[in-house]
Amino acid sequence: MNIAVLGTGNVGKALSGALAAAGHVVTMGSRTADNEAALAWTADNGVLLATFADAVRASELVINATGGGFSIEVLKSVGEDALAGKVLIDVANPLDFSKGFPPTLSVCNDDSLGEQIQREFPSALVVKALNTLNCELMVNPSKVPGDHVLFIAGNDADAKAKTVALLWEFGWPAERVLDLGDISAARATEMYLPLWLRLMQSLGHANFNISVLTGNAP
Amino acid sequence: MNIAVLGTGNVGKALSGALAAAGHVVTMGSRTADNEAALAWTADNGVLLATFADAVRASELVINATGGGFSIEVLKSVGEDALAGKVLIDVANPLDFSKGFPPTLSVCNDDSLGEQIQREFPSALVVKALNTLNCELMVNPSKVPGDHVLFIAGNDADAKAKTVALLWEFGWPAERVLDLGDISAARATEMYLPLWLRLMQSLGHANFNISVLTGNAP
């Protein structure tokens, strides 16, 4: 599949590298197509580099791995026409580090970044996913033993099914991908970030995830 | 130990009943001491009933199991003098159901109910705990098999140690009580509630909890 990964940070690199290794044609989207560090990394990893807009135009599925504070602006530079009808997997978290660590969320409670993106680009098929764990674990779940899980949320069932299929390629069995419902459930996974950050501080590293254990229904 | 449990709802009943069964002298705090339904329940369960203020005055440890929207008002009716130096375990979540289900939080992101209570009553030893799971599971963790966890947060190490000891009486091994740090970590556990609520909707029941799985530190 032709896949655009928007963002050249650690998350974009982890996702691009894993998708290219799995045989996809990956175009990493960047603000400019001539960023030297990004050009070197993409050349070394079998990934193409283009502007955000060109990366999306070349691809049938888009992953937003930009910083949450810039995601809407980046997607506006792409434009809705290029996003229309495409699965847009939103991995970003709206973290605001302006007041130090731990960061706050720039949107939460009665809205979320996932919902903002879906509202701003109504013809894109937004699926919130992968935003609740470290980027190395995203593409290599066996780094943490056990049946830990991730969450998806979105309005389009087919887009969620395509996301589940892509996650399977990273090593996530479908039964460990929990569907929380429509895109408004992005609030739930984004608001988990403060707990994730506190756990990271307590543990001293980011190589962890949660599982959901259930007993009998009452 | 003499323990006050503030609140006569399901959470207050579950905690009071379990603490009384464990041999503690439990006084359930209510707005009035002559609520007939509460009087009947407390008589049946070996628990005393008193006003919020009288319950706290009779006790060396206090559990806030009132609705999060009323907790500050209830504790103000008790007064700081009665709370001074006492461990105050805050189980409440600041859920706002005024816009329907799922509820939003009336405080979050850069503040929390746990912090509000600690600020309002600086001489109380506030420990946020038990607010991330169903009340039946709070007092009977074996209802869900496996090493699921709960979280504590607070500024006073001795108060947290006393809370861990009390949780042990409910069946929580100390290694399954994760200390997230000072009371500002109450933000993290309160902001987990939207994810808990979505999971409850997906699962169709509340008999679940999360575990934290870790891999090797990178």
Image: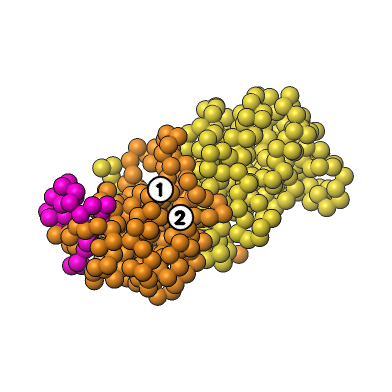
Chain colours: A yellow, B orange
- Number of callouts: 2
Q: Looking at the image, is mark 1 or mark 2 earlier in the sequence?
A: 1
Q: Quadrant of residue B21?
A: bottom left
Q: Which residues are magenta?
A: B22-45
Residue drawn where x is 29% and y is 71% of the image: B60
For the C terminus of chain B, which image quadrant?
A: bottom right
From the top left corner, tell me how far across and down residue A104 is, in percent.
Answer: 60, 53
Front residue of B96 and B82? B82
Say which mark, if any, is on residue B69: 1
Residue drawn where x is 42% and y is 34% of the image: B100
Q: Amino acid at mark 1?
A: Gly
Query: Is the residue under label 2 in contact with that under label 1 (CB below 8 Å)?
Result: no
Q: Does dot 2 land on a helix, a strand or a loop? A: helix
Residue B54 against residue A10 in the figure, above or below: below
Task: Describe residue A39's horizontal placement relative to residue B117 as left or right.
Answer: right
Return the residue at label 2. B113
